[in-house]
Image (tube, helix red, strand yellow):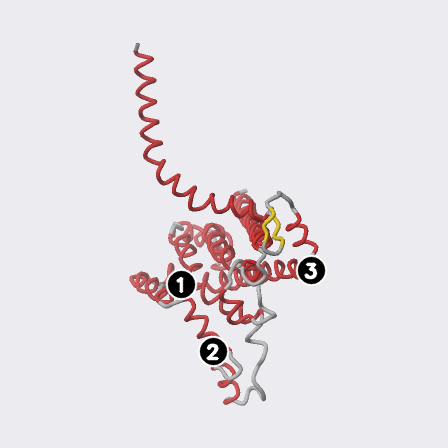
Amino acid sequence: MALRSSFGTKWKRSFAGWRLIGGPFLFGFLLLLAPLFLMVALSMWTQDYLDLDRTPTLNNYKDIFSHPVYVMLIKRSVSISLIVTLMTVLLAFPMAYYISFYGGKYKAIWLFLITIPFWTSYLLRIFLWKIILGYNGVVNSSLLSLNLIEEPLSFILYNANAVVIALAHAWAPFAILPIFVSLERIDRSMLEAAKDLGDSAIRSFFRVTLPLAMPGIISAALIVFIPTIGDYVTPKLVGGKDGLMIANMIQVQFSKANNAPLGAALAITSLMTVLLISLGFLFFNRRYLRKQTQ
């Protein structure tokens, strides 16, 4: 009797728990997984002019890897995103380090100032980069007035360079915050101990600060890399024909080309590429931390 009562109590608790998380779980499933399943199903169909053939096939994926344009766009998107990630982290780390170690009582003010770009429209900021980097923009006008160049620079707009600059600027605040949090969690007594043991400031940084901040660095890298590889607006506005990325081709397939299955296959291919590279980031972080603790 006692066993049956105990079983009934556990079942009621389990049911109450599932009822508590059931709503958010169902909402998350419908919001995230259901569209993904639909996209996978769509990628295995075939567009025949105005007719949609729902016979499962992998022909869209075969077309992607056999067509040099699609492969080139995927490679370009990955390379641009990796460069943007590297630049953003290299810019964000010194700022986060300064705020954490030298910000003093003004840390909150510094963090507040970092969030100011969030107040303006992302689209507006990209248009400002067009004005800054344009043929007659701020950069070229300043360099011409200083007689540092004889004619306007043409390689800073409507190419991959402009996309990298605009994306690095847009995502820098997102990278600063996780790095700052990791630096704040470092026990300052460990740095004092390293100094007492004779470590120089540089040696202490590479042996103590950097390994302990690595989770924040990897988080910042993922926060920047994952969305930038699928960015559509920035390459569309400042990339020109040499700075277009895979998201621009996906949009073309869904609209002008009227080939939604191929667009879905491109999206799934991009998603898998992001997943593999993200797992590589996490694997590197684990290997690095394991090596530091040995």
The amino acid beneath tag 2 is Ile
Q: CA distance from mark 1 to mark 2?
A: 28 Å
294 shown above or below 82: above
Q: Which residue is mark 1?
A: 98
Characterize the local packing of mark 3: few (<14), some (14-19) or many (20 or more) Cα atoms within 10 angstroms.
few
Residue 109 placement (x, y as % from top left):
30, 64
Q: Residues within 10 Å of mark 1 (few under 14, many from 20)?
A: some
Residue, disc 3: 68
Distance between mark 1 and mark 3 Cα atoms: 45 Å
Q: Position of residue 58 (x, y in %)?
A: 65, 46
Q: Quadrant of the N terminus?
A: top left
Q: Quadrant of the C terminus?
A: top right
How many marks the image carries: the answer is 3
Q: Which mark is residue 235?
A: none
- Please name which of the two marks, 2 or 3, marks the residue nearer to the observer: 3
Mark 3 is on which residue type? Pro
The dot on residue 132 is 2
Q: Residue furthest top?
A: 1
Q: Are marks 1 and 2 in contact (CB under 8 Å)?
A: no
Label 2: few (<14), some (14–19) or many (≥20) C-alpha neighbours in 10 Å:
some
Please give left or right for residue 88 compared with residue 19 in the image: right
Front residue of this view, candidates 199 and 99 = 99
Between 178 and 43, the one lying in front of the other is: 43
